[in-house]
Image (spheres, rainbow, N blue to C red):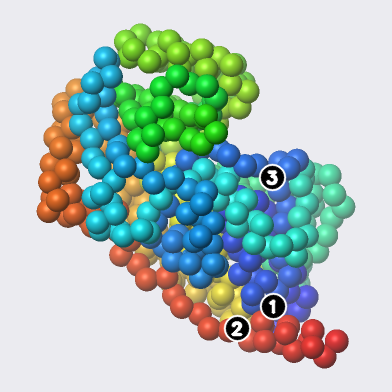
């Protein structure tokens, strides 16, 4: 094997990073995780989980825990200003096509579940981040904001849409983010008076919508999606200014639930807020640095499968590294096997963003008609197979040479 110390730095302790660390360990390598947050971030927004992500979760033995932590919604409905149902679709359509391989889960809970699978066997540096990456002959020197510089065999950026590793290694203009014309905000609150169990409920007007979903322990999550001409909202950098923006956008819509939502929004201590964007790169690797998950190929928050794609990409990358004679070969195979699928899914996500939050009254009517037709089993099954089912088989990998060598070394020791 040409890889010498086999120590790999992973930037990011979200979904992609811990998944990558898990599979690197299975391949006899030594991952180190650095995470900008001072502690592990649980909670966050809710994600739908199916397809390629479920395939990897099964291979990690995570499905029982996913079932325990996740949610299975029976309905996704849109209501009018008075709370009367306009349209919707039942969960039985998804279950009929996907079986039991579809659920919703808080993104942070999924990440923590994967991280716990590491059982403390991976060095994790919280409260720090990569500031510079300097290629060397057979390694990479990494500078951190707080910790002393260190040398690694490889560096993998798993640090999301606004990846610091991508910026440090590829340069600010090496790739681009494609803004899809929307921004999204999420907060979770306690004590909201309305609880429609197992239901994802939304109210929409042209160019914006707000949705709520019931969580355990008396909690309720809210998702706001609204169109905006610019990706940068430079004036709205603070949480309080972002709350003001949301109030300005939604206060005049007349939904009967808005006064109570506004009170809970005002009291919220944590508000996720970001653009709805995709990451597009000509390559996912450069020298001894590679990217995975949203850092490499973010499909956008509205795509619904970012976490699943992150897990599948991390699984493929780690196993290719475990089998290759050098990292460059592994990086090429990782892209060859996964990029065509991702490009198809990103294209589908761009189209879906427009239908998720239509910009016109006619678009809302069309959406309602499609959802009503989806309640008819043959039509609903066709729509799920066409728009949701993943046309991709996650590769199977046997025991890696690196894992076997590592095992033999431990026995010899």
Q: Is residue 363 above or below residue 72?
A: above
**Res. 403 image quadrant:** bottom right
- Name the spot of residue 13 as percent of width and height, x first: 65, 51
Residue visible at 67% across and 71% down in the picture: 25
Q: Position of residue 36 (x, y in %)?
A: 71, 43
**Residue receiving disc 3:** 40
Tell me the quadrant of the picture where the N terminus can be found. bottom right
Earlier residue among tags 3 and 2: 3
Return the residue at label 2: 400
Query: Label 3, label 1: how many angstroms apart (C-alpha)?
Result: 25 Å
Residue neighbourhood size for the residue with mark 1, other residues' Cα within 10 Å, grouped as few (<14), some (14–19), many (≥20): some
Label 3 crowd (10 A; few <14 / some 14-19 / many >=20):
some
Q: Which residue is mark 1?
A: 28
Q: Residue at left 34%, top 30%?
A: 201
Asked if disc 1 and disc 2 are in contact, CB closer than 8 Å, the reply is: yes
Residue 109 against residue 287 in the figure, above or below: above
């Amino acid at each position: 094997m040409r890889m010498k110390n086999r120590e790999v730095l992973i930037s990011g302790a979200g979904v992609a990073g811990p998944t990558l660390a898990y599979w690197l360990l299975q391949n006899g390598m030594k991952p180190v995780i650095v995470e900008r947050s001072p502690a592990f971030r649980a909670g966050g927004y809710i994600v739908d989980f199916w397809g390629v992500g479920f395939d990897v979760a099964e291979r990690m033995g995570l499905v029982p825990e996913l079932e325990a932590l996740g949610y299975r919604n029976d309905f996704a409905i849109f209501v009018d200003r008075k709370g009367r149902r306009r349209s919707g679709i039942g969960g039985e359509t998804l279950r009929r096509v996907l079986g039991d391989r579809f659920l919703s889960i808080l993104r942070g809970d999924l990440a923590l579940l994967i991280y716990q699978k590491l059982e403390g066997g991976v060095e994790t540096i919280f409260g720090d981040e990569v500031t510079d990456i300097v290629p060397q002959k057979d390694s990479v020197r990494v500078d951190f904001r707080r910790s002393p510089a260190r040398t690694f065999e490889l560096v993998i950026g798993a640090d999301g849409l606004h990846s610091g590793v991508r910026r440090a290694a590829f340069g600010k203009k090496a790739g681009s983010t494609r803004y899809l014309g929307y921004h999204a905000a999420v907060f979770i609150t306690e004590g909201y008076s309305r609880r429609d169990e197992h239901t994802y409920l939304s109210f929409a007007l042209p160019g914006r919508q707000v949705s709520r979903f019931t969580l355990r322990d008396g909690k309720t999550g809210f998702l706001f999606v609204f169109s905006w001409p610019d990706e940068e909202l430079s004036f709205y950098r603070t949480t309080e200014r972002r709350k003001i923006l949301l109030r300005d956008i939604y206060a005049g819509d007349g939904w009967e639930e808005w006064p109570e939502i506004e009170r809970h929004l005002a009291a919220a201590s944590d508000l996720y807020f970001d653009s709805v964007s995709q990451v597009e790169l000509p390559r996912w690797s450069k020298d001894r640095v590679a990217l995975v998950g949203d850092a490499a190929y973010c499909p956008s928050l509205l795509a619904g499968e970012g976490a699943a794609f992150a897990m599948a990409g991390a699984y493929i990358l780690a196993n290719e590294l475990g089998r290759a004679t050098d990292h460059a070969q592994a990086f090429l195979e990782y892209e060859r096997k996964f990029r065509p699928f991702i490009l198809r899914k990103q294209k589908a996500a761009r189209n879906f963003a427009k239908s998720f939050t239509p910009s016109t009254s006619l678009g809302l009517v069309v959406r309602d008609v499609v959802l009503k037709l989806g309640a008819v089993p043959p039509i609903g099954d066709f729509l799920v197979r066409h728009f949701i089912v993943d046309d991709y088989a996650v590769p199977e990998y046997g025991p890696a040479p690196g894992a076997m060598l590592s095992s033999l070394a431990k026995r010899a020791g």
